[in-house]
């Protein structure tokens, strides 16, 4: 939050008008760092001067109480560098702007003008006339429905224009023709249905264009002829089904392309062939069902690829060809149930994070991929219905720093697994079924900087929660544990650990009861095991036969064995828990 300056005071109009005579003296006062004692500041605003080594003193005027019905322009100090008129969401302003900045003494220093959440219905001609040094105009959250070239006359040095969260429908050709220095144009969250030809004429320097959240359905290639130096293009939630690839020919310097949450069902094999400089590509939230071979073969500089929340069942064996600098890959929330191991060969040396969350992947498919990614730092394994994770799962990933295993079915804290990930700093294990943490679990957690344990089935009796309470009051885990809530017993469900004391907890079940329940439990277990063995015997036979046929076909097709690729003869205990599967694949 911005700190408020000394209580703003109201200066009579006559002092303001006479003020220009004193301008020199006042500027000196400001420059000598007398913290704005002689600044005019409207009553409803706050004004403060900061000092910047390069820029000198910077006077910020901020009016953000809301419910303003006019801009007290006469009381703004003409030295203002930044004017920020905003309002809380429940107390919007109702403002209009005409040529209010055209004053006998100009706002010669004004660099940034923000008028936000103020229900401005239109801009009007020449509104910013005379603000030659303005660099940034921020008119987000207003009620603009149309804009045209005259609105922006005189803004010869403007580099950033933010018009998002309005209701703009109309933008004629050459709307921005006076903004020849513009680099950033944000038009997201409007009602723009089409981009008319020559819309961006004279915007030769534009490098960042955000069109997200507009009902565009298609992008007119014509308009991109005028903005060939574009570096970043965003059109998330634009209702796009496809993009005319002509556009990509016109913007070959593009480094970031965000087409997330549109309606792409497929991409042509040469879709991105012109984008040789592309570093970040977001295609999440579409309806893609396959990524074909060599899809990104020409995007050799790609570092971030997001394919989350599509309908991918498969990444083709050569889907990642040439992506030798890929660092982040997100394939979460698709329908992937298996991998071709060679898919990942190109990224083996570069990949740092991979997100497998929310697919139909069995753990052994993931284990096989993780084995060839020894440098991986972040892994997403959320929403995979995992009841447990074998202790050796990350045995080849000793650099693991971030792990998301939230939204699974873990009933026990994976202590052994985590003793082997020495460098782990971020762990999300929320939304599981953990009931308690033992002393050793808590000691392991103490060494992890960022932890999320919420939404588990914490059992609040003295045996289960007692130690956790001790750690809450005495260790760095204070903040983490304090926010947890009891799940059982019923009497304490929803109670926060921060309100808990040892005395409020139920006592431990007595030793006799405990012994009896253990004995009863063991007997049940024996019966269950017997039944399970009997059942499993016939089942495994059938399943093994089934796996055999499928797996053999698949591995034959791929002509590879993970073991061979790794130069290892066994996959370690990770693989051995899936005995039927692995035996068959080794034998094929
Ligand atoms: C626009 O103004 C609002 C309110 O002051 C602010 O929260 C937002 O960050 C501003 N946007 C830019 C790009 O400065
Ligand atoms: C501005 O737009 C909002 C939402 O579209 C609407 O509720 C409000 O009445 C409009 N305000 C004016 C002054 O037109
Ligand atoms: C603003 O633009 C004019 C004309 O291009 C230029 O002469 C002037 O130096 C610019 N001002 C700043 C502060 O860059
Ligand atoms: C991979 O990159 C090389 C060198 O740029 C290029 O010759 C080759 O065609 C690319 N592969 C694909 C499949 O595009
Ligand atoms: C997947 O995990 C990465 C880090 O591991 C994270 O940045 C990303 O947000 C996750 N994606 C989703 C859709 O949860
Ligand atoms: C897991 O799935 C739930 C329900 O679909 C979703 O709300 C949640 O964001 C997902 N979490 C992660 C980390 O993927
Ligand atoms: C932990 O997860 C819960 C539930 O998903 C979320 O509300 C909370 O913000 C998370 N806390 C941290 C510190 O990530
Ligand atoms: C734990 O956190 C609470 C609230 O943040 C704080 O009041 C308390 O002093 C902290 N206790 C310890 C031991 O750090």
Image (cartoon, grey):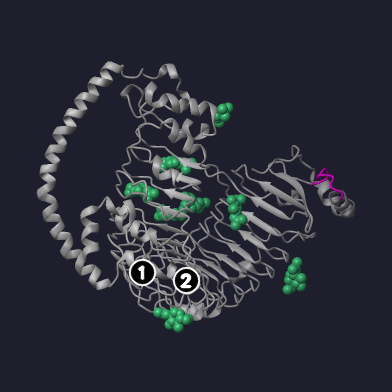
- The quadrant of the rendered image in which ligand 4 is seen is bottom left
- Residue 553 rendering spot, x and y as whole percentages: 20, 69
Magenta: main secondary structure: loop
Question: Range of the magenta residues?
Answer: 32-39
Q: Which of 465 and 391 is in front in this view?
A: 391
Q: Which mark is residue 302?
A: none
| Image quarter of the C terminus | bottom left
Under circle 1, the secondary element is: helix
Q: Is residue 486 inside the magenta stretch?
A: no
* Quadrant in which residue 296 is drawn: bottom left
Q: In this view, does 503 lie above or below 138?
A: above
Q: How many labels does the image show?
A: 2
Q: Is residue 170 among the parts visible in the rendering?
A: no
- Indicate left or right for 225 with 155 as reference: left
For the residue with label 1, is its CB less than 8 Å from the closest atom of ligand 4? no
Picture residue at 25% right of the left edge, 62% below the top: 586
* Quadrant in which residue 581 is drawn: bottom left
Q: Residues within 10 Å of mark 1 (few under 14, many from 20)?
A: some
Q: Is residue 61 above or below residue 155?
A: above
For the residue with label 2, is its CB less than 8 Å from the closest atom of ligand 4? no
Q: Nearer the viewer, residue 579 or 456?
A: 579
Among numbered discs 2 and 1, the one appearing first in the sequence: 2
Question: Pointer 1: what residue?
Answer: 343
Q: How crowded is mark 2: few (under 14 residues within 10 Å), some or many (20 or more)?
A: many
- Residue 429 rendering spot, x and y as whole percentages: 40, 42
Question: Pointer 2: what residue?
Answer: 324
Q: Is residue 133 among the parts visible in the rendering?
A: yes
| Image quarter of the N terminus | top right
- Residue 267 rendering spot, x and y as whole percentages: 35, 73
């Amino acid at each position: 939050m911005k700190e408020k300056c000394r209580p703003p005071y109201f200066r009579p109009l006559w002092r303001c008008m006479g003020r220009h005579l004193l301008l020199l003296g006042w500027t000196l006062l400001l420059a000598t760092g007398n913290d704005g004692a002689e600044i005019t500041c409207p009553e409803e605003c706050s004004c403060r001067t900061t000092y910047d080594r390069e820029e000198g003193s910077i006077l910020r005027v901020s009016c953000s109480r809301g419910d303003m019905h006019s801009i007290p322009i006469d009381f703004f100090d003409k030295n203002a560098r930044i004017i920020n008129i905003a309002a809380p969401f429940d107390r919007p302003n109702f403002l209009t702007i005409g040529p209010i900045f055209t004053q006998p003494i100009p706002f010669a220093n004004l660099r940034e003008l923000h008028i936000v959440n103020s229900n401005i219905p239109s801009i009007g001609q020449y509104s910013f006339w005379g603000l030659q040094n303005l660099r940034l105009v921020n008119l987000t959250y207003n009620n603009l429905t149309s804009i045209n070239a005259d609105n922006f006359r005189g803004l010869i040095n403007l580099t950033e224009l933010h018009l998002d969260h309005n209701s703009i429908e109309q933008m004629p050709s050459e709307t921005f023709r006076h903004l020849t220095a513009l680099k950033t144009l944000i038009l997201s969250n409007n009602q723009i249905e089409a981009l008319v030809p020559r819309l961006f004429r004279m915007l030769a320097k534009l490098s960042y264009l955000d069109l997200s959240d507009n009902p565009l359905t298609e992008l007119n290639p014509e308009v991109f002829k005028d903005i060939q130096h574009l570096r970043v293009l965003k059109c998330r939630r634009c209702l796009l089904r496809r993009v005319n690839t002509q556009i990509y020919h016109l913007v070959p310097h593009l480094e970031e392309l965000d087409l997330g949450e549109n309606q792409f069902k497929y991409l042509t094999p040469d879709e991105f062939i012109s984008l040789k400089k592309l570093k970040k590509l977001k295609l999440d939230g579409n309806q893609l069902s396959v990524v074909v071979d060599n899809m990104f073969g020409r995007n050799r500089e790609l570092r971030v690829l997001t394919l989350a929340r599509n309908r991918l069942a498969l990444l083709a064996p050569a889907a990642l060809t040439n992506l030798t600098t890929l660092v982040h890959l997100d394939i979460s929330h698709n329908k992937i149930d298996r991998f071709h191991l060679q898919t990942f060969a190109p990224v083996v040396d570069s990949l740092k994070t991979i997100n497998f969350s929310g697919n139909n992947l069995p753990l052994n498919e993931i284990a096989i991929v993780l084995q060839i990614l020894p440098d991986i730092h972040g892994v997403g394994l959320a929403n995979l219905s995992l009841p447990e994770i074998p202790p050796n799962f990350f045995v080849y990933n000793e650099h693991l720093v971030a792990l998301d295993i939230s939204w699974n079915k873990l009933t026990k804290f994976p202590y052994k697994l985590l003793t082997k990930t020495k460098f782990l700093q971020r762990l999300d294990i929320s939304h599981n079924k953990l009931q308690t943490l033992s002393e050793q679990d808590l000691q392991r957690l103490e060494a992890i900087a960022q932890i999320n344990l919420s939404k588990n089935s914490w059992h609040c009796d003295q045996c289960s929660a007692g130690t956790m309470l001790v750690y809450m009051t005495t260790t760095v885990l204070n903040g983490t544990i304090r926010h947890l809530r009891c799940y059982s017993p019923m009497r304490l469900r929803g109670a926060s650990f921060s309100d808990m004391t040892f005395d409020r907890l139920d006592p431990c079940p007595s030793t006799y009861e405990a012994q009896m329940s253990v004995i009863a439990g063991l007997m049940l277990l024996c019966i269950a095991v017997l039944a399970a063995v009997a059942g499993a015997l016939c089942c495994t036979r059938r399943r093994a036969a089934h796996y055999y046929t499928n797996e053999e076909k698949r591995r034959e097709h791929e002509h590879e064995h993970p073991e061979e690729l790794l130069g290892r003869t066994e996959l370690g205990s990770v693989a051995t828990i899936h005995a039927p599967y692995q035996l068959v694949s080794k034998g094929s």
